[in-house]
Amino acid sequence: MDSIRVDVVDIDDPADPRVDDFRDLNSVDRRPDLPALPGGRVGKGLVIAEGVLVAQRMIASRFTPHAFLGVDKRLTELAGDLMDPSLEGVPFYRASAEVMAEVVGFHLNRGVLGAARRAPALPVDEVITTARTVAILEGVNDHENIGSIFRNAAGLGVDAVLFGAGCADPLYRRCVRVSMGHALLVPFARFDDWPRDLSAVRDAGFRLVSLTPGEGSVPLASAVDADRIAFLVGAEGPGLSETAMRVSDVRARIPMSRGTDSLNVATAAAIAFYERARSGTMDA
């Protein structure tokens, strides 16, 4: 593996301070992926990639890894990706599975971790400049749902994810893991003034479609044929706020049967994304 750009460093002592960026990943008091810690303390706010596939996507993203921790087998599997020039001199801390488990606080079946510092936040106008289809989230605070939405967005041709009020951190470790690393690749941005900033999305030519089973909603299939579409989805239970829905151009529902009135937010978003792709207007 002479052509890899990383520096391989063997770690035998789990207390070695060089691997502190991977330490205690399940600890609410010390986790390195939290920007803020209990008691008002400032956290590291790192982005953590788990597993070969997510590490590969981190390498390909704007979140350039500054360190890896993994077993020798994963080093071999990543050899081709570790030739990337951006990784020149980045340490790959090689450890046994036992040492790695003591560092992170649990046995990691995926066998490798990458750590990156957060890239600067992207502005909404930059994220939507060339986009045709975007997802807008309000109040979605479940990390697995956010990760699933990113994975669905990547697989079904959605160009960006935008965050309104009350949403969880998309760079939290579980979000990145559930998204299979797509949270690092699909562009995202946060609104500064919610929901007023939705007007900027409309001004950019997007039809704002609120997903809701409520009164006055039209079947989803009839709402997805505009040149540019922004789907608004809300949290489990309460859904979108009335304030956000009033700003939208149309309220759309997913037809359902047997008395069911709603779906998991990530599932609903995936159906909307698929309906948009099926309409044939995404690449028109």
Image (tube, rainbow, N blue to C red):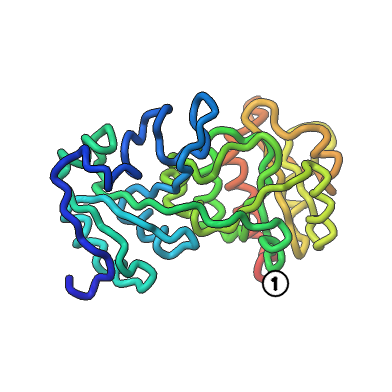
User: Circle 1 — which element?
Assistant: loop
Q: Position of residue 100 (x, y in %)?
A: 21, 41
| Mark 1 Cα-neighbour bin, 10 Å: few <14, some 14–19, many ≥20 | few
User: Which residue position holds label 1?
Assistant: 284
97 or 87, nearer to the observer = 87
The residue at the point 25 percent across, 38 percent down is: 103
Task: Locate residue 86: give its quadrant.
Answer: bottom left
The image shows residue 19 at horizontal and vertical percentages of 28, 45
- Closer to the camera in the image, 268 or 65: 65
Residue 148's x, y, as percent? 51, 44
The quarter of the rendered structure image containing the N terminus is bottom left
Name the residue rendered at 70%, 72% in the picture: 284
| Residue at horizontal 42 percent and vertical 28 percent from the top | 28
Asked where in the image residue 137 lies, by quadrant, the reply is top right
Query: Closest to the observer: 227 or 205?
Result: 205
Q: Give the answer, above or below, for where 13 lies relative to 75.
A: above
Is residue 19 shown left or right of residue 232? left
User: Residue at the location (27% across, 32% down)?
Assistant: 105
Asked if residue 156 lies left or right of residue 50, the reply is: right
| Residue 257, position as x, y percentages in the image | 64, 32
Residue 108 sits above or below residue 224 on the image: above
Indicate the amino acid at tag 1.
Ala
On screen, residue 107 above or below 188: above
- Report whether 138 appears left or right of 7: right
- Looking at the rendered structure, the number of numbered marks drawn on it comes to 1
